Amino acid sequence: MIRRIRTVLALPWAYQVFFNVIGAPQRSRILVRDYIRAKPGDRILDIGCGPGTILPFLPESEYLGFDASPEYIGLAQRRFPSANFMCERVSQYTLPHREYFDIVLALGIVHHLGDSEALQLFQIAHSALKQGGKLVTLDGVWTNEQSRPARYLLARDRGQFVRSQEQYLNLASQVFATVNASIRHDLLRIPYTHIILECIREQGSSPKVNESPEASRSPDQ
Ligand SMILES: C[S@@+](CC[C@H](N)C(=O)[O-])C[C@H]1O[C@@H](n2cnc3c(N)ncnc32)[C@H](O)[C@@H]1O
């Protein structure tokens, strides 16, 4: 049954319906208000943007989203013709502009990536951000205090790399010097535990590990 739901969720319209039923619009409002805190005119890069899920909740901004799914990107382009979308995997992505974005988002994607591609995501985000800019990630997380139903649903998530707080922090802090983590059990109508990371690109900071070739190209390449 759960496997069939996961297959159906690959369809963009089904993802949108599921998104609304589980209360994800409220999740998006909380994320934007309390963690993303974008200002009008901000430049935003959305990694693993899906069908542009977060866009209706953001203030007017210069937005670029990319995702590995052509179906999700197709729907996003039809829904939001004035925003920019690309179909690309994290591991293949070539950053168009370094130190250009005020905010990078990676909502619901890190737990889909193995450690090597997840590390690439953090490196892309670090290269993309202006100094003082912020990466916000949101993922399912294992904790000691979560309910059994939450553990049950997490174990059946489409993402095969749900991690503990320590494991997420270990990845992010290989690239970002400043990482704040928040655990939330209340973002959805279903039992589910999220971790939100706010990773700051400090003034004058370079990544703590080497940037990927994709991320280190100059804007004109
Ligand atoms: C749970 S969805 C989240 C979508 C959207 N950010 C949201 O909050 O609703 C995870 C997204 O990550 C994308 N994804 C998974 N692996 C990816 C990869 N290696 N590169 C780029 N996108 C990927 C999937 O296609 C999917 O749209």
Image (cartoon, rainbow, N blue to C red):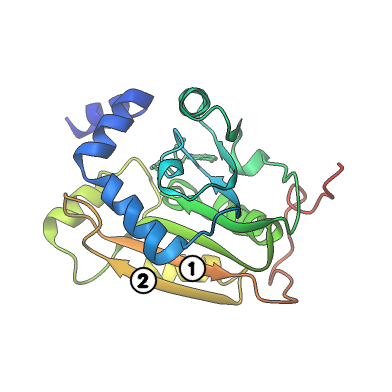
Q: Is residue 81 left or right of residue 79?
A: right
Compared across the picture, whether 70 is left or right of 95 comes to left
**Crowding at label 2, few (<14), some or many (≥20) Cα neighbours within 10 Å?**
few
Q: Which mark is residue 179?
A: none
User: Which residue position holds label 1?
Assistant: 198
Residue at image x 53%, y 65%?
171
- Residue 198: image location, x then y, percent: 48, 68
Report the amino acid beneath label 1: Glu
Residue ID at (57%, 40%)? 65
Q: Position of residue 55 (x, y in %)?
A: 46, 42
The residue singled out by tag 2 in the image is 182
Q: How much space separates mark 1 and mark 2, taking CA atoms?
A: 9 Å
Q: Secondary structure at mark 1?
A: strand
Relative horizontal placement of residue 76, taking residue 3 as reference (left or right)? right
Three-letter amino acid code at the position of disc 2 = Ser
Q: Are marks 1 and 2 in contact (CB under 8 Å)?
A: yes
